[in-house]
Image (spheres, rainbow, N blue to C red):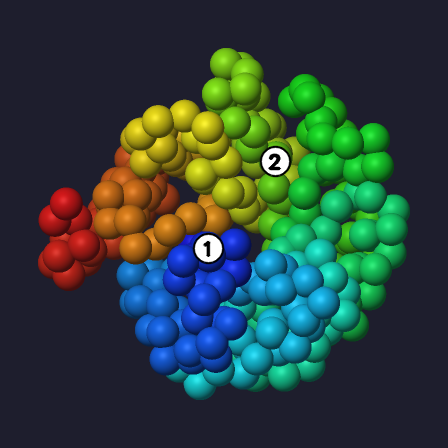
C-alpha cells in the first residue's frame, strides 16, 4: 500500500510549526526519517500556515529533508509559486503534488506544474460547484478529471484519486458513501491509484483512532491502495498488513510474516 506520511504539516502548531519557525532542521529531519522507517512511501510536506512566506519555507523544507531521507515528497500546497520552488530544488525520487481539483482556476495553475516537472498528482473529486454529496457525483468528477489529466499527457499510474472522505459525525452515511465510492473508483479506473486522508472520517468525534482504524480496514477491502495517515501509529500500520493479506494482495502472507519478524505487528 502507498503510505503518505502526514506528520510534517505546519498546522501542527506545537511541534512542526514551531520547528519550521525556529529553523529546527534536526527535529524535522528526525520526524521525516521516523516516518520513512515506519513504512511511509512518501513524506508529505506542508508549510501553508506561513502564508506569505510559504514558498521560502517549503523550499527550505525540501532542502533539509532530502539531506536526511531519499523518500519522495508529497508537496502539499495550494500555492503554485510554493510548489514550483519546492520542485526546483527537489533531488529525491519522483514527487507527487497534493493536490489538484476540477476548480478551473486551480486546475489551470497546478496542471502545468504536474506536466512540466513530470510529477504524480492527488486529484480531489470536487469542482467549482463545491464538494460532491453522492457517489455518482464523485465518479462523474473523477471521470472528467482523469480524462483531462490523461489528455494532458499524465500517465494513469501517476494519478491518485481522492474520493473526498467526509466526517461521519456530520452525516451517518458518510462512511458508507466513502467505502462505496472507493469500490466504484477501483472498478472504473483500475490503472490509477487512490489516496485519501484516513482521519477525515473521524473529525469531530471521540476516540478518533478507533474509527480511523475501522475505516482503514473497510477501505482497503473496497480497493483503496493509498492513504494519507500517521505511519507512526503502529496499530494502524499493522492493520494495513493484515488487511492486504486478507484480500489477497500479499502472496502467501510473505510481507505479513516479514513485518512480524521485524516486530512491527507487536501492538
58 vs 190, nearest the viewer: 58
Instruction: Answer with the quarter of the image where residue 59 lies.
Output: bottom right
| Residue 62 to residue 190: above or below | below
132 vs 208, nearest the viewer: 208
Q: Can you give x and y, in whole percent of width and height, for residue 40 in the image?
A: 39, 60
Instruction: Answer with the quarter of the image where residue 249 lies.
Output: top left
Q: Residue at x 80, y 43 (%)?
A: 102
* Quarter in which the C terminus is drawn: top left
Q: Residue furthest top?
A: 172
In the visual, does 26 lie left or right of 261?
right
At mark 2, the secondary structure is loop
Q: Do the residues labelled 2 and 1 touch (CB within 8 Å)?
A: no
Q: Can you give x and y, in whole percent of width and height, for residue 208 in the image?
A: 36, 32
Mark 2 → mark 1, Cα distance in angstroms: 24 Å
| Residue 124 to residue 90: above or below | above
Q: Is residue 198 visible?
A: yes
- The residue tagged 1 is 12
Q: Can you give x and y, in whole percent of width and height, for residue 79 in the image?
A: 74, 62
| Residue 89 to residue 161: above or below | below
Amino acid at each position: 500500500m502507498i503510505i503518505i506520511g502526514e506528520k510534517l504539516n505546519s498546522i501542527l502548531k506545537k511541534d512542526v510549526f514551531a520547528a519550521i519557525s525556529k529553523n529546527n532542521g534536526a527535529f524535522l529531519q528526525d520526524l521525516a526519517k521516523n516516518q520513512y522507517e515506519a513504512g511511509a512511501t512518501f513524506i508529505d510536506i506542508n508549510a501553508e500556515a506561513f502564508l506569505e512566506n510559504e514558498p521560502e519555507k517549503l523550499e527550505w523544507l525540501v532542502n533539509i529533508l532530502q539531506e536526511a531521507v531519499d523518500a519522495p515528497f508529497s508537496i502539499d500546497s495550494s500555492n503554485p509559486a510554493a510548489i514550483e520552488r519546492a520542485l526546483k530544488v527537489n533531488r529525491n525520487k519522483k514527487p507527487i503534488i497534493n493536490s489538484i481539483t476540477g476548480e478551473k482556476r486551480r486546475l489551470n495553475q497546478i496542471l502545468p506544474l504536474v506536466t512540466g516537472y513530470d510529477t504524480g498528482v492527488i486529484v480531489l473529486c470536487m469542482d467549482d460547484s463545491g464538494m460532491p454529496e453522492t457517489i455518482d457525483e464523485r465518479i462523474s468528477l473523477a471521470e472528467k478529471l482523469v480524462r483531462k489529466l490523461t489528455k494532458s499527457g499524465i500517465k494513469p499510474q501517476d494519478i491518485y484519486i481522492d474520493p473526498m472522505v467526509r466526517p461521519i459525525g456530520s452525516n451517518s452515511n458518510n462512511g458508507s458513501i466513502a467505502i462505496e465510492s472507493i469500490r466504484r473508483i477501483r472498478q472504473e479506473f483500475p490503472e490509477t491509484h487512490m489516496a485519501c486522508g484516513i482521519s477525515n472520517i473521524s473529525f469531530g468525534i471521540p476516540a478518533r483512532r478507533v474509527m480511523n482504524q475501522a475505516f482503514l480496514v473497510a477501505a482497503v477491502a473496497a480497493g483503496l491502495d493509498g492513504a494519507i495517515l500517521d505511519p507512526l501509529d503502529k496499530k494502524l500500520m499493522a492493520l494495513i498488513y493484515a488487511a492486504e493479506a486478507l484480500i489477497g494482495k500479499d502472496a502467501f502472507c510473505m510481507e505479513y510474516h516479514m513485518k512480524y519478524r521485524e516486530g512491527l505487528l507487536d501492538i
